[in-house]
Image: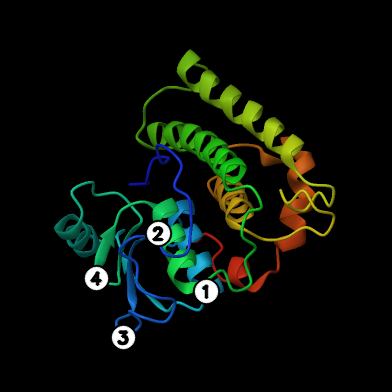
Amino acid sequence: MLEPRSRGAFRAIRGLPGAPGPRLGRLVRMKIFGSTSSPYVRRVRVVAIEVDEPIDLVDTTSEAGMAALHEVSPIGKVPTAIIDGRTIYDSRVIDHWLVSTRGWHGLTPPRDPWRDENIINAIDSALDAIVQVFYLQRGGLPIDGTAYAQRRLDRTATVLGWLARQLGPSRISFDPTPGGSLGLAEIALISALDWMDFRESYPTARASELAPLRAAWHDHPSLAATRPRE
């Protein structure tokens, strides 16, 4: 089952209370409960690659994997991470833990963390809307053409249009400087749109203004290695 969007902003800062230093807690590999198709799990996998954090993926598409997930999480949703002796249930919090304790490496910290959180929250809102429709359809419920489904499609279209207006001058990231960069917001958007294509759940071609961003990072190693698959 996919993780719903996070409630509230969580600012990534070095010196996070209770966090080890950048090179501590590395004797045990991070364990991630999830699947290779989940866009939320993909975000964590991408960030882990970028910050050079090895992971062990517990596949929750199997009965054994789901049983293992429920042993460590009362929520039972993915991703869940066990890292540095902690169990963390939310993709955004896991990502912030990684960059706060391992450093940003090749990723770019946001110039305005609160703007970045708003952008990621909007992405999650659009993704959640399509996830809900997809799983209801997959479960055989006749929701096509209903007001429920249309509201979620409309929300996604509105959010994607707003995101296009948040792009920086490079048009390949949300960074307001001319060069463009890859950060948590860009990873979140690419993961969401790629999942929509993978599941054929939303016509992402309608969001043509976001195409340059996707094209610019299409072959970036961490994103290429984590494209959704069954």
Q: Nearer the viewer, residue 28 or 157?
A: 28
Residue tagged 4: 85
Give the alpha-carbon distance from disc 2 to disc 3, as whole Å. 18 Å
Give the alpha-carbon distance from disc 1 to disc 2, as whole Å. 12 Å
Local packing at callout 1 (Cα closer than 10 Å; few below 14, some 14-19, many 20+) is: some
Q: In the current view of this chain or complex, which residue is farthest to the top?
A: 147
Give the alpha-carbon distance from disc 2 to disc 4, as whole Å. 13 Å
Residue tagged 2: 94
The residue type indicated by label 3 comes to Leu
Residue tagged 1: 51
Q: Which mark is residue 27?
A: 3
Up/down of 188 relative to 48, above or below: above
Give the alpha-carbon distance from disc 3 to disc 4, as whole Å. 11 Å
The residue type indicated by label 4 comes to Gly
- Residue 149 image offset from top left, x and y in percent: 49, 22
Give the alpha-carbon distance from disc 1 to disc 3, as whole Å. 16 Å
Q: In the current view of this chain or complex, which residue is farthest to the bottom?
A: 27
Of labels 1 and 2, earlier in sequence is: 1
Q: Nearer the viewer, residue 230 or 184?
A: 184
